[in-house]
């Protein structure tokens, strides 16, 4: 596997009134994760990227971290540093955001 951790952040766009991760700052989350990884010098070993629907719309904005396959829901921009430091760097998932999925 090329990357130690791979973060897929939903930025799917759905028509109203359905909830949509893309409308709920999914794109901004992608940029924030990329910036946080760059600041820590982790871009060669970890990757964050946008993805289509993760089938967790009701819990969005949603993302999943591989190789563990841990889903997070209702992720806010203020949660990015905690997820990076706790989960990606120290292998401790952020329990308050985890989805039992």
Image: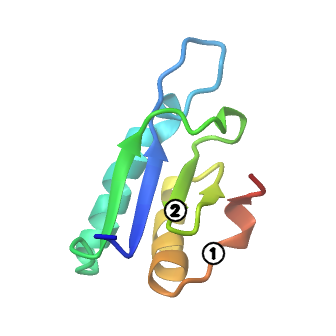
Looking at the image, is 68 positioned above or below residue 31? below
**Element marked by disc 1:** loop
Instruction: Return the residue found at the far front.
Output: 1
Residue 65 numbered mark, or none: 2
Local packing at callout 1 (Cα closer than 10 Å; few below 14, some 14-19, many 20+) is many
Image height of 18 relative to 28, above or below: above
Residue at the spot x=30%, y=60% of the render? 34
Residue plotted at (52% across, 70% down): 83
Q: Quadrant of the N terminus?
A: bottom left
Task: Estimate the x, y position of residue 68 in percent, counting from the top left.
Answer: 57, 69
Which residue occupies 78% across, 56% down?
100
Left or right of 57? Residue 9 is left
The answer to whether residue 15 is left or right of residue 4 is: right
To which residue does mark 1 refer?
93
**What kind of colouring is applied to the model shown?**
rainbow
Q: Residue at x 53, y 33 (%)?
A: 53
The percent coordinates of residue 46 (x first, y second) are 33, 71
Compare residues 17 and 42 and report the one nearer the observer.
Answer: 42
Is the Cβ of the residue at disc 1 closer than 8 Å to that at disc 2?
A: yes
Q: Give the percent coordinates (x, y) of residue 62.
A: 58, 46
The residue most toward the right is 100
């Amino acid at each position: 596997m090329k990357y130690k951790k791979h973060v897929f952040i939903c930025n799917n766009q759905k028509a109203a009134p359905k909830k949509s991760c893309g409308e709920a700052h999914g794109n901004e989350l992608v940029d924030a994760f990329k910036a946080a990884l760059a600041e820590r010098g982790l871009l060669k070993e970890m990757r964050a990227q946008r993805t289509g629907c993760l089938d967790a719309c009701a819990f969005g904005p949603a993302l999943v971290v591989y190789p563990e396959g841990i889903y997070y829901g209702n992720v806010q921009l203020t949660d990015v540093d905690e997820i990076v430091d706790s989960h990606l760097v120290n292998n401790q998932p952020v329990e308050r955001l985890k989805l039992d999925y």
